[in-house]
Image (tube, rainbow, N blue to C red):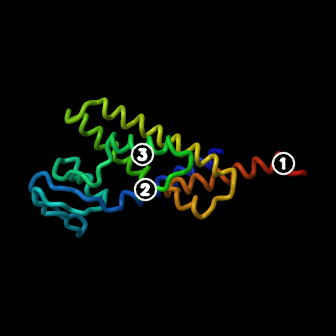
């Protein structure tokens, strides 16, 4: 069983790596000359302007209060609450626009934590964010477990996030082997 866990964790880390290479929209908080590293230039940045950058490139600028996540990209406790309520209220697996929405929630937790540390928002917002995140993951996991007992339709497959597809494949194989063990004659 340990081998399955390691393979799944490696696959999930690869999916998260792909997410970190996705571009996000940022807004400049304060002018910055930018810098070059390994032949790649980043900046200059002008206050008030928007920039589309890969998440991993934008992150250091955000950490150092040069850029911030644009309001179109945000994922705060209110957004996560909306996701959690819709997942709770619909017994079927919902298709999300962003196949990386679970990764986005995971990664954007950093911004909520940063705002709490900087005393821009109350810690209660982080607690809510975490609680709603747990609800989303648990509700989607229950739906995946139900689906894993059957063959996945093309429509259902479209509803899965990239990380859920990995988990589904593992669950389906394990459940199929377990069921066959008990239901098949020797």
Q: Hey, which quadrant is residue 77 in on the image?
A: top left
Label 3, label 2: how far apart the Cα atoms are: 13 Å
User: Which residue does the image show at 23% across and 54% down from the upper left?
Assistant: 70
Q: CA distance from mark 1 to mark 3?
A: 38 Å
What is the x, y in percent for residue 14?
47, 57
Q: Residues within 10 Å of mark 2 (few under 14, many from 20)?
A: many
- Name the residue beneath numbered marker 2: 100
Q: Residue 83's mark?
A: 3
Secondary structure beneath disc 3? helix
- Mark 1 vs mark 3, foreground winner is 3
Q: Nearest the camera: 83 or 54?
A: 83
> At numbered mark 1, what does the secondary structure look like: helix, strand or loop?
helix
Nearest to N terminus: mark 2 or mark 1? 2
Q: Position of residue 36 (x, y in %)?
A: 19, 64
| Left or right: 122 as drawn, with respect to 22 | left
Which one is in front in this view, the residue at disc 3 or the one at disc 2?
Answer: 3
What residue sits right under mark 1 in the picture? 183
Judge from the rendering whether residue 19 lies leftward or rightward of residue 176; answer left or right.
left
Residue 82 on image: x %, y %:
39, 43
> Which of the two labelled residues, at mark 1 and mark 3, occupies the earlier sequence position?
3
Q: Residues within 10 Å of mark 1 (few under 14, many from 20)?
A: few
Q: Outermost residue, right direction?
A: 186
Q: Which numbered tag is attached to residue 72? A: none
């Amino acid at each position: 069983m340990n081998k399955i866990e390691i393979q799944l964790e490696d696959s999930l880390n690869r999916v998260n790596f792909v997410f970190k290479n996705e571009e996000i929209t940022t807004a400049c908080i304060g002018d910055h000359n930018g810098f070059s590293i390994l032949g790649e230039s980043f900046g200059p940045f002008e206050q008030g302007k928007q920039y589309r950058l890969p998440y991993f490139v934008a992150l250091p600028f955000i950490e150092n209060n040069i850029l911030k996540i644009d309001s179109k990209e945000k994922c705060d406790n209110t957004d996560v609450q909306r996701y959690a309520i819709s997942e709770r209220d619909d017994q079927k697996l919902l298709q999300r626009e962003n196949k990386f929405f679970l990764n986005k929630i995971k990664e954007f937790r950093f911004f909520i934590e940063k705002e709490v540390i900087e005393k821009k928002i109350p810690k209660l917002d982080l607690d809510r964010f975490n609680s709603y995140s747990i609800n989303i993951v648990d509700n989607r996991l229950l739906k995946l477990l139900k689906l894993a007992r059957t063959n996945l339709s093309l429509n259902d497959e479209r509803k899965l996030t990239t990380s859920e597809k990995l988990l589904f494949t593992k669950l389906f194989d394990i459940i199929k082997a377990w069921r066959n063990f008990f239901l098949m004659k020797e």
